[in-house]
Image (cartoon, coloured by chain):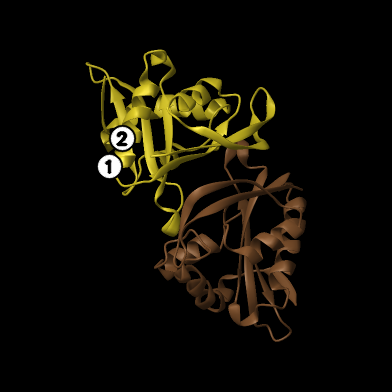
Chain colours: A yellow, B brown
Amino acid sequence: MLIREATPEDWPAIWPFLHDIVAAGDTFTWDRDISEDRARAMWLKEAPGRTFVAVDEDGTVLGTAEIHPNQAGPGSHVANAGFMVDPRHSGRGVARALCAHVLDQARTDGYRAMQFNAVVETNHRAVALWRSFGFEVLTTVPEAFDHAEKGLVGLHVMYRKL
Amino acid sequence: MLIREATPEDWPAIWPFLHDIVAAGDTFTWDRDISEDRARAMWLKEAPGRTFVAVDEDGTVLGTAEIHPNQAGPGSHVANAGFMVDPRHSGRGVARALCAHVLDQARTDGYRAMQFNAVVETNHRAVALWRSFGFEVLTTVPEAFDHAEKGLVGLHVMYRKL
């Protein structure tokens, strides 16, 4: 598996699984029926943000991640990041590899910490993965996510220093 | 004091004090040298967001507030809000009146809670005001704000149900 910066040419490979993940309404606080144009603008970050893809030896896109300042101006030394793995390629360590890469890049880019604002508390795999990378749950905003199947569940604020 | 929805014609009265507040770098996580065009786009919200102004009997703009969904899609039932009071009109209860108005409007618009993601912990007046309206500090993200005078200070996540 290789992780590299994404290019506009990667988008057609990202959009199908990104669309399905967002439409499922169980992990992302995005409009479930978001347009492709809007999704592309949100996911393919402009500098200082970055977007990555994880590809296998055939060049197949397995997953993608992005990093950006969590706040602007006096809050821009704390990073935020997002991760999407194609469900057809789950169980291969793609999210773990992307997370390790994003943490390294964030340190290189001079961020001092990383914060996730809205980790769905029922997304147990993601929560466990971030915990294994040293993230802690600072708080859980109650009933802040309207889960497609489970109704109102909490959103974790997760954080680690870099 | 009257609170009403802001119009594009209010912007020239908002920009001078909004600019000064942002440039001071002690309360907002905005770029301190933000352009006027960018600031206008960020402050004058599109639906379902709303922007308000508080005006006195002469029509002078004393302060402004905005409300918008804190997250999109499955997180859009939690509101976020922002407040700016012209320092020349502080001490007249403008922020208190704006907060009461925004809470009422948020209930009317169907939001179930309100969350602030980044309240600078040294902004004691604001923190005390939100507390007086029933907001609690869910957590404080350490050293997440590079205060112009005090260096790295924390950012409160504040929350209340509606």
Under tag 1, what secondary structure? helix
Q: Chain of mark 2?
A: A
Res A88 → quadrant = top left
Apparent side of residue B78 relative to residue A39 in the rendered image (left or right):
right
* Residue furthest bottom as drawn: B58
Which of B114 and B124 lies nearest the eye of the viewer? B124
Q: Give the image location of residue B160, x and y in percent.
A: 72, 48
Which of B107 and B24 lies nearest the eye of the viewer? B24
Q: Give the image location of residue B19, x and y in percent.
A: 48, 72
Q: Chain of mark 1?
A: A
Q: Which disc is residue A104 wearing? A: 2
Q: Give the image location of residue A4, x and y in percent.
A: 25, 31
Which of B150 and A56 lies nearest the eye of the viewer? B150
Which of A128 and A153 lies nearest the eye of the viewer? A128
The amino acid on which the numbered mark 1 sits, given as a three-letter code, is Thr
Within 10 Å of disc 1 (Cα), the crowding (few <14, some 14-19, many 20+) is few
The amino acid on which the numbered mark 2 sits, given as a three-letter code, is Asp
Q: Is residue B51 visible to us here? A: no
Q: Give the image location of residue A114, x and y in percent.
A: 43, 40
Which residue is label 1 attached to?
A108
Residue A31 sits above or below residue A61 on the image: below
